[in-house]
Amino acid sequence: MIPEIRVPEVVGFAFPNDIHITWSLMIVLYPYLTGIVAGAFVISALYHLFGREELRPISRFSMATSFAFMVVATLPLLNHLGHPERALNIIFTPNFSSAMAGFGILYNTYLLILLLEVWFVWRKDIILLARRNRGLKRKIYAAMALWTYDISPQALEKDHSAIRVLTAIGIPAACMLHGYVGFLFGALKANPWWSTPLMPIIFLASGMTSGVAMLIILYQVAMKVSGQKIESETIASLNRWLWLFMIVTVSLELLEIITLAYEQSEAWEAIHPLLTTKLAFSFISVQLILGSLIPFILLMIAVTMNRYLHDRVRNTLSFVSALLLLIQVFAMRWNVVIGGQLLSKSFRGFRETYSPQLFEKEGILAAAGIFCLAFVALFVFAKILPVFKALEEPRTVKLEAEAKRS
C-alpha cells in the first residue's frame, strides 16, 4: 500500500524549503499577555503616581492583574521551545548583542520592580494578616512581611514614597517589555509586513488597549460576583482611557496600511493580496469592523454622553466594547505574527495556511489553558491578599498606637 503523501497548500511561487510556518499560536499569545501586563500596570500607575483618585477603587486590582499575567507570560515561549530548560541560558550566559536575549533582561527587571511594588503596596495588609492569624498561616504572612511589624505613620509614609519611585521606574520598564516585542518584528527587514518603525509603537498602544479592556471586564465581573457596587466614576474614567488608547492604536494601524498603499512600492504588491485573501476575514472583518469600528461607536456614546447614561447602560457599553477590543488586539497579534509568515520569501506567493489544532502541543487547548492560568493566578492572589480594599487596623490597636505617640 502506498502511504498517503500530504502536499502542502502553497499559493503562487514558494521555495521548496520555504513552505511551513514556524511561529505558532504560542507566539501570538505571548505578546497578547505582555500587553495586558503593561496596560494594567499603567492604570495602577495613574493612581499611585499621578493621583487619579477616580481610579483608586481599582488601583490594587490592576496591579494584581498585571502581576498575575506577568507570572504566566513566559509560558507560551517555554511551550514553544523544543528544550524549555535552555531558556535559562539567556540569564546565565547573556548575549547583549542578541535582540532575543534582551527579553530575559527586560522581563526579569520588570518582574523585580513589580514584586517590590506589590510588597510595598500590600505590606500593611500582610502585617495585619500575620497578627490576625495563628499557626502556619501566621508564619507565612510573617515571612512575607520579612518579620517586620512596623506600620507606624512614618513607616507607611516611607512605603508610599517607595511605591511612587517604583511606579516611576516601572512605567518605562513595562513599556519596554511590551514595545520590545514590536521591536523584534519591526527589525526584521526581510519581511515587508513586519519591517516598519511603527511596529513597536503599535504593539505598545494595542497593549495598553488590551490591558484597560481586560481590567474593565474583570472589575465588573468581580463586583458582580462579590455583590459590591461598580463605581460609576471608575468605569467612566476607564472608558475614557480605553477610547483614547484604541483611537491611537487603530489610527497607527490604519496609517501604516495607508502609507504602504499610497507608496505602491514592491512591498505593497505582496501585502495587498495578503490582506485581501489570506487575512481578509481576520483583518478586515474581525480587526477593523468588529474589533475597531463597533467599539469606537459604543465608547463614543459612553464617553460623550456619560452624564446622561444610567449606570447599567454605561456598564454594558463598557463591557461589550472591552470584550470586542480584546478580540481586536488578539486579531492584530494573529495578523502580524501569522500573517507575516504567510508571505513566501519570493513575495510572489504564500506559504501553507496555518490552522492550530485543538489538542496539539501548541494548539488551541494549550493556549486556552495558559491564558486561563492567568485568571487562576489572580484568584490565588485575591485569596492571599485583599485586592480591592486595604484591611482596617483594629480600633484597640489604633488607640494604643495613638497613646504611645502622645
Image: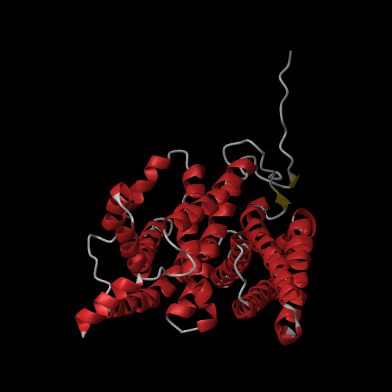
Number of numbered discs visible in the structure rendering = 0
Quadrant for the C terminus, please: bottom left
Q: Nearer the viewer, residue 239 or 262?
A: 239
Left or right of 181 in this view: 273: right
Residue 115 position within the rendered picture, expressed as x and y whole percent measured from the top left = 36, 62
Residue 143, located in which quarter of the rendered image?
bottom left
Residue 393 position within the rendered picture, expressed as x and y whole percent measured from the top left = 35, 71
Q: Nearer the viewer, residue 392 or 224?
A: 392
Residue that appears at 41% across and 68% down: 391
Residue 196, located in which quarter of the rendered image?
bottom right
Q: Residue furthest top?
A: 1
In the image, is residue 352 above or below residue 265? above
Q: Nearer the viewer, residue 390 or 213?
A: 390
Residue that appears at 24% across and 66% down: 149
Residue 221 in sight: yes
Residue 313, located in which quarter of the rendered image?
bottom right
In the image, is residue 245 above or below residue 224? below
Left or right of 202 in this view: 102: left
Residue 246 position within the rendered picture, expressed as x and y whole percent measured from the top left = 65, 74
In the image, is residue 233 above or below residue 36? below
Query: Which colour assignment does the render follow?
Result: secondary structure
Residue that appears at 41% across and 70% down: 173
Quadrant for the N terminus, please: top right
Left or right of 264 in this view: 74: left
Residue that appears at 35% across and 47% down: 88
Residue 23 in sight: no
